[in-house]
Amino acid sequence: MEVINAELRQWCHELPKVELHAHLNGSIRDSTLLELVKNHGDNGVLISKDVEQMILEKGTSLRKCFELFAVYHVLATDHETVKRITKEAVEDFAADNCIYLELRTTPKKNEAKGMTKRSYMDAVIDGLKEVNTVDVDLYGCELTNKKNGDRRRKKIFVRLLLSINRSEATSSAIGTVNLAMEMKDMGVVGIDLSGDPTVGQWDTILPALEHARKLGLPVTLHCGEVRNSKEIQAMLDFNPQRLGHVCLLAEEDWERLKSLMIPVEICLTSNIMTQTIPLIEYHHFADLYKSKHPLSLCTDDTGLFSTTLSNEYYKAAVSFGLGKEEMFKLAQEAVNFVFANEDVKKHLAQNYEEAKARIL
Ligand code: IMP
Ligand code: ZN
């Protein structure tokens, strides 16, 4: 049985952290989800009892995750709910001492609710404006009014990535890239490719990713969640700015990833809960870390996997024997991989300098 080191847990909480891989709908609080289910009622599309059961079993396999995402999307696709879950997600990350959050989400159309991909994203931004437990810096200016002129309030930098779902058609994926470009001055800093890894074809999405590259938008790809060597090789050929997961790579692809030095977003709890990696002791974090490969610890879906970024750091510390200085360096180095500009990086670097004296 795991012995809980409360002091180390608290230290991981206090450590300033940079989150690079968090999906908005995967970060919905359980309490909000249950409330949304209740308000939705048994209307024939969703039966509350079934949903409650799904929530209890959430995140226990890759298949169950994607079943649950389908439910989330029925519950959370109206402007008010999108606004609410954005506000809550940012407040939760800030409460966990996250100082930079790159939040990714798939812009969704919902004609019945008068929602376009653009109005979905506007609702996300409206949600950021409603955050009131912390100051939010979105595009180089603070969105939240300082309550009572309090200048000592905590601050979180939030930047947005627009996700392309693997099941989308080429034209829809290109539309998402164009939307990201249109919203470049509103905190959108890049493109993500995600969705059920057992569906979709790389060739369908590639034109949109090449379009993003031409426009100067950085790209991160979910890679190697299932064994698909051909696709993994194509992703490495594309040589994106970052890769997520990289769990099931063949030996030669693994060596290539290492020689390309593409920064990796590591999601320990997600990989174990979805059974993509059978045991944490076998997780490729250890090999990448030992090889000094650029990497960053991330949550993936705090709601779905009932985790926090502090918990991911704690897990890494106890599973791989990392000391506080190593953990601090790991968090600090993530600043190098953010998609935000040099100004933001400088601010974050300064935050770490200040924190060093306080917690090391
Ligand atoms: P959204 O983009 O805000 O709707 O966040 C949920 C979506 O993120 C899901 O529908 C998936 O497309 C994607 N997603 C979340 N977690 C994972 C993962 O572990 N693998 C691949 N896609 C994921
Ligand atoms: Zn993910």
Image (cartoon, rainbow, N blue to C red):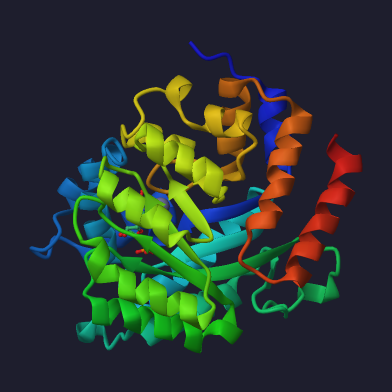
Quarter where residue 73 is shown: bottom left
Asked whether, in this view, residue 242 is left or right of residue 62, the answer is right
Asked whether, in this view, residue 280 is left or right of residue 273, the answer is right
| Number of numbered callouts drawn | 0
Indicate the position of residue 314 as horizontal and vertical percent values: 61, 31
Indicate the position of residue 243 as horizontal and vertical percent values: 47, 52
Asked if 18 appears above or below 285 in the picture, the reply is below
Q: Quadrant of the C terminus?
A: top right
Indicate the position of residue 10 as horizontal and vertical percent values: 70, 33
Asked if residue 68 shows in the view, the reply is yes
Residue name at image x 54 percent, y 78 percent = 216
Residue name at image x 39 percent, y 49 percent = 30
Asked whether, in this view, residue 255 is left or right of residue 140, the answer is left
Residue at the far right: name it.
Answer: 357
Asked if 193 appears above or below 68 in the picture, the reply is below
Residue at the far top: name it.
Answer: 1
Asked if residue 267 shows in the view, the reply is no
Residue at the far left: name it.
Answer: 44
Q: Along the line of sight, which residue is nearer the eye, 27 or 62?
A: 62
Indicate the position of residue 218 as horizontal and vertical percent values: 53, 69
Residue name at image x 89 percent, y 50 percent = 354
Residue name at image x 34 percent, y 44 percent = 224
Quarter where residue 146 is shown: bottom right
Asked if 97 appears above or below 147 in the picture, the reply is above
Asked if 97 appears above or below 165 in the picture, the reply is above
